[in-house]
């Protein structure tokens, strides 16, 4: 490469102007590299002014050259000064571009780093070629021309591999990021919980694309995890690149060079994000299963403790009465025998109720309950249950039930639910107790309401849980195993309905049974 041209006698001759235009394009080449380098981030104002001013001045100067010496002819003083100015402009811009690209490659993915540094070295190499051309003698040696040609060819290859490296070369460079992806997937498979998933994957996402921050979102846009940025600051953070996933998205804050130089790395990031969402969902489900298992284990422990306690007490009383009758039965008075028989009946009844509840619970859990809906006269059914459960107090219960009201339910399930509500109202509530029923909106509704203290607000969320009881030290609250309401709701749900609670006004408890109406032809 030699900055010379053909000798022409006339300044306006076409060959001279063609040479001038070629030199003007040479002047603009380092400026184009400069524009490429600063397109990712604006430099200081004075650098911009110097680059534009020097390039524009040299372009005008090249077009104003009076002549251009041919190879082998001595250079004029004005042309030598022009060549010196061109070398300064070219070298200065090339060094700026090389330094900027080299520094920008630090901390970037391997492909990005190599491509940017190849461009930096290419800019330096081309500058060296130009300097050699500028300082070469009028008749350079063959060895010098070969060296100059080799440097020019090397510069071309450096720019080619920097701007458009072959696929095989990019794959070889990308091996560290692919290894990182494989290791990340392996670690995700071993993640114990959702926090472990985020601790594992977010730093790896940052490393794959050389980002400074990253966030993983679910399909609803909720932030599952963030690295390098506070989750609360995502809405105000600027410059994030959003990658849409099948069930969510990744937002990554990286250098401006990465989207241009690291397309394949963003594909790796996309794949890792998909694996991360799958691992997150799996860990969430595992956590739920673990919680359910722990809850079931706790219920089992409660069952064993409560069942043991509830069975031990009446069993001990029954055994004590049986022992007394066996050892001292002939010595007891009639009054003592009557009292013992009454206590024996009460304790065996208590045992029967508990065993029935446990059997109901086991059948409901195993879906072993077979319901047989049939028409039921609601008012007469309620009256029969009141007589059986509260005896003489039945007249104190206010009934607001139409005499003609008839619904289709399973009679046994209906009795189990209503019996529990009546017993609870009489045991824990206070008069007046009211039972009302209606059938409209394709639903049958039965309400049992009392004017007692009601259910403590803090206990309401656990009201229908198994083996749970409110304050056992309160009067009457130590009875039962905490199964009645759980079984009653299960019976209601088995019929497609539900059992609900709300505080009564001004005070008390209000339970409502809601069951969808079944047509006679569906029975």
Image: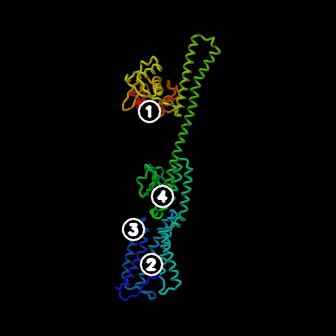
Q: Nearer the viewer, mark 3 or mark 2?
A: 2
Q: Left or right of 331: which side holds 124?
A: left
| Image height of 423 relative to 151, above or below | above
Identity of the residue drawn at 58% across and 24% down: 313
Between marks 1 and 2, how big is the CA–CA gap?
88 Å
Q: Which residue is mark 1?
A: 498
Callouts 3 and 2 close, C-beta under 8 Å:
no
Between marks 4 and 3, how big is the CA–CA gap?
26 Å
- Which scheme is used to colour this image of the protein? rainbow
Looking at marks 2 and 4 on the same chain, the residue that comes earlier in the sequence is marked by 2
| Image height of 148 relative to 307, above or below | below
Q: Residue lying farthest right?
A: 327
Identify the image quadrant of residue 45.
bottom left
Other residues around mark 4 within 10 Å, as few (<14) / some (14–19) / many (≥20): some
Looking at marks 4 and 3 on the same chain, the residue that comes earlier in the sequence is marked by 3
- Residue 281 percent location from the top left of the image: 50, 48
- Residue 212 — which label? 4
- Residue 87 — which label? 2
Q: Secondary structure at mark 2?
A: helix
Other residues around mark 1 within 10 Å, as few (<14) / some (14–19) / many (≥20): some
- Residue 244 percent location from the top left of the image: 44, 55
């Amino acid at each position: 490469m030699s900055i010379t041209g053909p000798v022409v006698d006339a300044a306006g001759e076409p060959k001279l102007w063609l040479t001038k235009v070629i030199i003007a394009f040479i002047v603009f080449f380092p400026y184009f590299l400069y524009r490429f380098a600063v397109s990712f981030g604006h430099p200081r104002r004075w650098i911009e002014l110097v680059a534009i001013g020097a390039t524009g001045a040299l372009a005008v100067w090249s077009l104003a050259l009076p002549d251009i010496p041919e190879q082998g002819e001595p250079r004029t003083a004005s042309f030598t000064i022009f060549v010196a100015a061109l070398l300064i402009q070219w070298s200065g811009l090339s060094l700026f571009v090389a330094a900027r690209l080299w520094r920008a490659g630090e901390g970037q993915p391997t492909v990005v780093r190599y491509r940017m540094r190849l461009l930096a070295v290419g800019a330096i190499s081309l500058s060296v070629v130009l300097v050699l051309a500028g300082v070469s003698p009028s008749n350079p040696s063959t060895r010098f021309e070969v060296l100059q040609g080799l440097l020019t060819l090397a510069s071309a290859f450096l720019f080619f591999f920097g701007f458009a490296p072959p696929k095989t070369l990019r794959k070889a460079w990308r091996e560290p990021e692919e290894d990182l992806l494989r290791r990340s997937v392996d670690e995700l498979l071993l993640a114990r919980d959702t926090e472990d998933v985020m601790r594992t994957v977010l730093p790896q996402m940052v490393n794959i694309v050389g980002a400074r921050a990253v966030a993983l979102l679910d399909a609803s846009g909720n932030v599952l995890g963030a690295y390098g940025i506070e989750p609360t600051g995502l809405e105000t953070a600027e410059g994030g690149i959003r990658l849409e996933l099948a069930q969510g998205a990744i937002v990554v804050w990286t250098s401006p060079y990465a989207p241009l130089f690291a397309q394949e790395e963003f594909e790796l990031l996309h794949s890792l994000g998909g694996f991360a969402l799958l691992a997150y969902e799996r860990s969430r489900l595992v956590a739920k299963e673990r919680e359910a298992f722990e809850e079931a284990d706790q219920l089992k422990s409660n069952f064993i403790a409560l069942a043991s306690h509830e069975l031990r007490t009446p069993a001990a009383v029954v055994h004590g009465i049986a022992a007394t009758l066996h050892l001292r039965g002939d010595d007891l008075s009639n009054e003592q025998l009557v009292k013992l028989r009454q206590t024996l009946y009460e304790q065996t009844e208590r045992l029967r109720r508990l065993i029935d509840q446990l059997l109901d619970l086991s059948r409901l859990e195993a879906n072993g309950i077979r319901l047989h809906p049939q028409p039921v006269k609601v008012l007469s059914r309620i009256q029969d249950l009141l007589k059986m459960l509260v005896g003489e107090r039945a007249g104190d219960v206010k009934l607001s039930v139409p005499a003609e009201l008839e619904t289709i339910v399973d009679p046994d399930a209906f009795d189990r639910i209503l019996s529990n509500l009546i017993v609870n109202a009489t045991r824990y509530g206070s008069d007046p107790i009211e039972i009302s029923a209606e059938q409209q909106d394709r639903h049958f509704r039965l309400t049992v309401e009392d004017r007692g203290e009601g259910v403590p607000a803090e206990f309401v969320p656990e009201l229908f849980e198994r083996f749970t009881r409110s304050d056992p030290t309160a009067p009457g609250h130590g009875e039962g195993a905490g199964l009645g309401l759980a079984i009653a709701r299960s019976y209601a749900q088995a019929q497609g309905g539900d059992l609900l609670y709300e505080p009564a006004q001004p005070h008390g408890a209000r339970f409502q049974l809601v069951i969808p109406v079944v047509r006679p032809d569906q029975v």
